[in-house]
């Protein structure tokens, strides 16, 4: 039997240098990949950190803008007293927003946008309030000017009215005085009337039976013509009024009079005599000085004296 020759084939790569090169390549590729991943991670970290810092800055900017709005309102309220209640409400809203923003821990872009919208609304509201407040202030200033002008006109009118009233009062006094006749040539004497009607004047007490008072009514073109009444009052040395003792009102007081003389006045000078007859000769006619007063239209228009011995 022929023996077969058996040959042993080894299939394993017995080249050590080839394996080593493969590992080196793999390590290099893995290192490059790790470096790239690390660089990308670091870049992302830097970008996120920058974004975070930017959002923090924007948060501070939001707070600053709200503070500026608040200060602006406070200044406006000092300068303009209009719509203070509405401005106070706006300030309260700003304070609430400031507190709300400060509480935000993780500020995001959406949060920043939200508060920017709120600030924009507040600024729009502020501008509208300022516009209305300025309009009201101008309107009030105009009203104040008109009021001052009206007050000045009223004051002038009052002065004119007061002047007119004063003139009317003065004119009324003049007219009232014009209605009063002030007699002249006033005289008084003791008289005795004889049975024949003859009047005998005397300065003796014991011969005097009556007291005659004469006066002249002056001419007056203003006073209406017609009946005029003059009242005579005779006071003896004892302070007693003698005569008829009727009463008339003078300045709110009742005054006793001795006689009344009614005349028809025609705006011409007129002489009038009044005779006062005592009720009791022995009691009323005494020695001494007598006071004689004449009244017309509620005014004392003349006086004179008489002395009986």
Image (cartoon, rainbow, N blue to C red):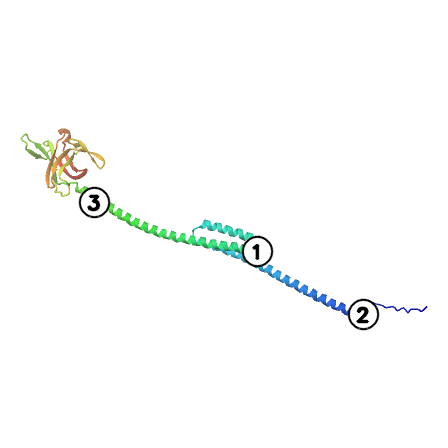
Which comes before the other along the chain, label 3 or label 1? 1
Q: Residue 128 falls in which quadrant of the image?
A: bottom left
* Numbered label attached to residue 52: none
Q: Which residue is mark 3?
A: 171
Q: Residue at x 38, y 52 (%)?
A: 139
Residue 240 picture quarter:
top left
Q: CA distance from mark 3 to mark 2?
A: 149 Å
Which of 241 and 69 lies nearest the eye of the viewer? 69
* Relative image position of residue 66 (x, y in whole percent): 52, 55
Badge 1 is on which residue? 110
Question: Where is residue 82 drawn, in percent x and y?
Answer: 43, 51
* Above or below for 122 versus 293: below
Q: Is residue 103 above or below residue 240?
A: below
Left or right, residue 51 beside residue 159: right
Mark 3 burial class by Cα count in 10 Å: few <14, some 14-19, many 20+: few
Which residue is nearer to you in this view: 154 or 43?
43
For marks 3 and 2, give the one nearer the viewer: 2
């Amino acid at each position: 039997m022929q023996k077969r020759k058996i040959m042993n084939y080894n299939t394993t790569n017995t080249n050590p240098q080839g394996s080593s090169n493969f590992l080196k390549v793999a390590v290099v590729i893995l290192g490059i990949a790790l470096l790239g991943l690390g660089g990308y991670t670091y870049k992302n970290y830097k970008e996120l950190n920058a974004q975070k810092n930017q959002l923090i800055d924007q948060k501070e900017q939001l707070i600053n803008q709200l503070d500026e709005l608040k200060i602006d309102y406070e200044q406006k309220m000092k300068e303009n007293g209009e719509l203070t209640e509405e401005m106070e409400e706006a300030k309260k809203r700003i304070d609430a927003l400031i507190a709300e923003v400060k509480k935000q821990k993780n500020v995001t872009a959406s949060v920043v946008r939200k508060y920017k919208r709120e600030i924009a609304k507040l600024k729009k509201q502020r501008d509208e309030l300022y516009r209305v407040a300025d309009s009201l202030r101008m309107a009030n200033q105009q009203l104040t000017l008109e009021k001052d002008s009206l007050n000045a006109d009223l004051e002038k009118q009052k002065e004119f009215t007061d002047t007119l009233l004063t003139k009317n009062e003065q004119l009324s006094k003049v007219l009232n005085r014009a209605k009063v006749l002030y007699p002249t040539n006033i005289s008084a004497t003791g008289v005795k009337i004889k049975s024949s009607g003859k009047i005998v004047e005397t300065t003796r007490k014991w011969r005097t039976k009556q007291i005659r008072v004469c006066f002249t009514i002056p001419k007056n073109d203003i006073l209406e013509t017609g009946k005029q009444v003059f009242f005579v009052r005779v006071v003896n040395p004892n302070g007693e009024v003698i005569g008829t003792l009727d009463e008339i009102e003078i300045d709110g007081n009742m005054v006793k009079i001795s006689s009344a003389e009614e005349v028809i006045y025609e705006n011409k000078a007129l002489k009038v005599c009044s005779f006062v007859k005592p009720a009791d000769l022995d009691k009323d006619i005494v020695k001494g000085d007598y006071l004689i007063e004449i009244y017309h239209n509620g005014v004392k228009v003349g006086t004179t004296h008489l002395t009986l011995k």
